[in-house]
Image (cartoon, rainbow, N blue to C red):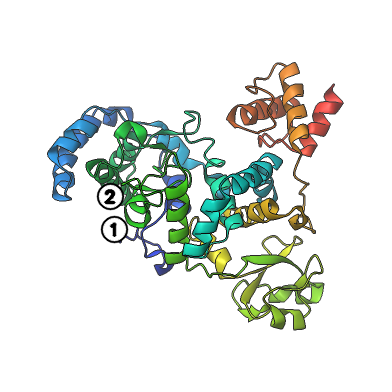
Amino acid sequence: MSRFLPNGLSQQFALPLTRRQWLAMTLGAAANFAFGVPVEARSTFEAWVKAFRARALRSGITADTYARVMYSIKPDNDVFEFNRYQPEFKVPMWQYINRRCSEWRVTTGRERVKEYAGLFERIERDYGVERYGLAGLWGMESSFGDVIGNPKYMRPIIPALATLAWGEPRRRRYWQQELINALRIVDRGWSKPDEMVGSWAGAMGHTQWMPEVWLNVGVDYDKDGRIHPFGNPADALAGTAQYLTKRGRYQRGEHWGYEAKVPDNRTRLADKRTWRTYAQWQKLGIARADGKSFPRPDDRVRLWIPVSGGPGFLIGQNFYAYRSYNPSDSYTLALVHLGDLIRDDSFHFIQQFPGGERIPTTEEVKEIQRRLTEKGFVTDGVDGRSGRDTVNAIRAYQKKVGMEPDGYAGLKLLERLRQGS
């Protein structure tokens, strides 16, 4: 198991990094790294592949596997552009949450929880990770497996990792190790190179495992003789539950936390550092926003107000367990909120974020798509889902009419489209 810790990272990430952890930690580096690789350097990729062979063989990769996999690949230079833009850290929190907690994701999540009820029950028994939060993670990572095979979102990961290992100078050791991990998966016969498709950074399958996670935390939960994050979601969901318990220290039976009602004279207590029990917070005037009681008043939590003037939250260890999958507050809050909405509609936020708006319905997104199509913008269909084509169409329209081109299919956009008609 690789224990490589990139320079400048705190010891809380001493365990091998997930793709999402990597994205957060490299944000600053990516901003300073010149986009792409100079034209004159691109001809050296084949030479680099030949030179890297010695490192791979020393790591246990067979010569046959290396030749079969590596000598035919071409650099995937798009990865440098993707490395520069990471929405978890650039989109306002309310909008990021609204995008990820769409009505389609909530409805589909409920269908998947029902469809795989036996699998979720078994995982709850074996690992203690409750089904709704795990379903929220599944929805966040791959829209419940819906985008796994879609070339608009996924690409062959070995060329992507090789390109980063060759041409991204800031964290080259990390990318090289993940490339070796990917080759080791092929060497073990767990997958074929053409099956290994995923994100630009090498994350794969239902819950977007990096190769290191696949190798070291994966579980053959369906007992078919190999660990595989594609196809049947059993291995992916069980391995992710194991990740949350082993690396995230997930606590069986605890909820991640709750939206809290924070009096103005108590906002100074929201330091996101001080642990108190729910009962102790309640004595200080911090209650659940919905007025209900805390089911486990002795669990320890922290008080957090992510955006001044916005909702407050009491967050426990399981919030941080999910955060270990991606150290972004926006990502984590969206994930646990999606899980709550899959569980019950009553978990909608009671206090809105400043400047925010409610999540649009599927019908409202369809109306946005219809109106854009009528105006000549290409959304690739009217399905109520804000995919890449819809986002690009929205941006084009927003630029045309002088709106901020954020690509968000929200209520302000719909109002503007209605006015325009």
Q: Is residue 98 above or below residue 395?
A: below
One can see residue 179 in this view: yes
- Label 2 environment density (alpha carbons within 10 Å; few <14, some 14–19, many ≥20): many
Name the amino acid type tagged 1.
Ser
Percent position (x, y) of residue 302?
Answer: 63, 73
Q: Which residue is mark 2?
A: 177
Number of disc labels: 2
User: How far is mark 2 from mark 1, CA to CA?
Assistant: 8 Å
Q: Which residue is mark 1?
A: 2
One can see residue 327 in this view: no
Percent position (x, y) of residue 273?
Answer: 59, 75
Dividing the picture into quarters, in which one does residue 134 lie? Answer: bottom right
Q: In this rendering, would 126 be left or right of 306?
A: left
> Helix, strand or loop at disc 2?
helix
Quarter in which the N terminus is drawn? bottom left
Q: Look at 39% across and 48% down and name the residue there.
A: 210
Q: In this rendering, would 45 be left or right of 352?
A: left
Residue 344 or 3: which is nearer the viewer? 344
Quarter in which the C terminus is drawn? top right
Q: Look at 57% across and 41% down and name the residue there.
A: 143
> Helix, strand or loop at disc 1?
loop
Res 174 label: none
Name the amino acid type tagged 2.
Gln
Choose the circle earlier in sequence order: 2 or 1.
1
Dividing the picture into quarters, in which one does residue 83 lie? Answer: top left
Q: Look at 69% across and 66% down and name the residue there.
A: 258
Percent position (x, y) of residue 102?
Answer: 68, 42
Tag 2–tag 1 contact (CB < 8 Å):
yes
Percent position (x, y) of residue 201?
Answer: 41, 42
